[in-house]
Image: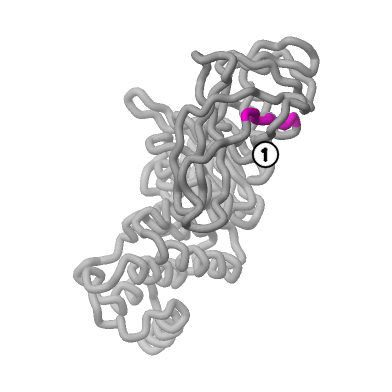
Amino acid sequence: MGLEVQMEKKFPGFQLNVDFHTEGGCMGILGASGCGKSMTLKCIAGIEKSDKGKIVLNGRILYDSEKKISLSVQERNVGYLFQNYALFPTMTVEQNLAVAMKGKKREKEQKIKEQIRRFRLEGLERRYPSQISGGQQQRVALARMLLHQPEIIMLDEPFSALDGFLKDELQLEMLELLKDYGKDVLMVSHSRDEIFRFCDRLILLEDGKSILKGSTAEVFSNPEKMEAAKLTGCKNISAVQKMGTYEIYAKDWDFVLKTKEPVGDEIRYVGIRGHFIYPVWEKTEENTMEIAIAGYMETPFEKQYLFRNACAPGSSRIWWMQKKDNFEDGGQEKLPPYMVFPKEALMLLR
């Protein structure tokens, strides 16, 4: 049955208004800082109270403003992994796990040993949170959460406090854990890479409102709205003027583009991801722009070029990304004089 959420919460100068339901697997909530992602989780968990609406988990009402129902945090049986993990600093690893359980001492000890082994915490039982690494703290928090046997897991920026290799390792571990868990998972992140990696479905939040929801792959391939395209990482967006059923004028790039899809009257922008643009030496294809280089930078694995329309010096810069063959494959090189904007890669946006 999953989780059904339809709620509102008002703050001075800000209003949270979300409406979604899970469908099994992992659902992501993606948005910029301050858009209401964490507050949504807190309202579901009962840490914060909504002003209006309904929250239902597997057919059980957690909150209903009309029926005056608002279960306590303990009654909701929701697993919530906080950004800072919320371990008790004066308790050892073993004690942090024990507080999550009820029952006889021997039964608790056996289950704690199982979790210690499952989460590779052997040898850390008597250490305090300050004496273990961030990755180990996360594993303790996950182990404690699962001892509650929650009906849903909610992850609030689970990798924001981790760096580099450790983050990659823990993401692999988390993927395996979520497969084993088998129930609904709700994950909040500002990282589109994390959401794409973990989540089957996706909600985009902006200024407290859901602006788009659907399968993750569909949202990334066709974000529909300019705000959604930005949230999913598209750097190349231009305002447009409709020229014909399959033709637009990109105002910021001062360039006319042919489109694969018909251009509706509601279309106000066009977007294209930098990885889908490609260079050519001759102007023999549709949507081929003569370019002038306008900037360059690189990462360990990519070369990132900025260019603009050579025939319009005042036009906006456009990003193009190229993979490196090796770490020495860096430095700005002479590029072909033209770039192609493939019709099938153009995103028509409201």
Which stretch is magenta? 337-343
Disc 1 target residue: 221
Check residue 245 for magenta coloring: no
Report x, y in % for residue 174.
Answer: 50, 65
The crowd level at tag 1 (other Cα within 10 Å; few <14, some 14-19, many 20+) is some
Residue 215 appears in the picture as rendered = yes
Secondary structure at numbered mark 1? helix
Q: Residue furthest bottom?
A: 106
For residue 60, say whether it is visible.
no
Q: Identify the colour scheme used.
A: one colour
x 45%, y 31%: residue: 295
Rendered-image quadrant of the N terminus: bottom right
Q: What is the number of callouts on the image?
A: 1
Q: Is residue 117 above or below residue 15?
A: below
Name the one closer to the observer, 244 or 288: 288
Residue at x 54%, y 23% (from the top left corner) = 308
Q: Amino acid at mark 1?
A: Ser
Q: Residue at x 54, y 50 (%)?
A: 195
Residue 144, above or below 53: below
Left or right: 83 as drawn, with respect to 70: left
- Residue at (57, 44) in percent of width and height: 322
Of residues 6 and 256, which is closer to you in this image?
A: 256
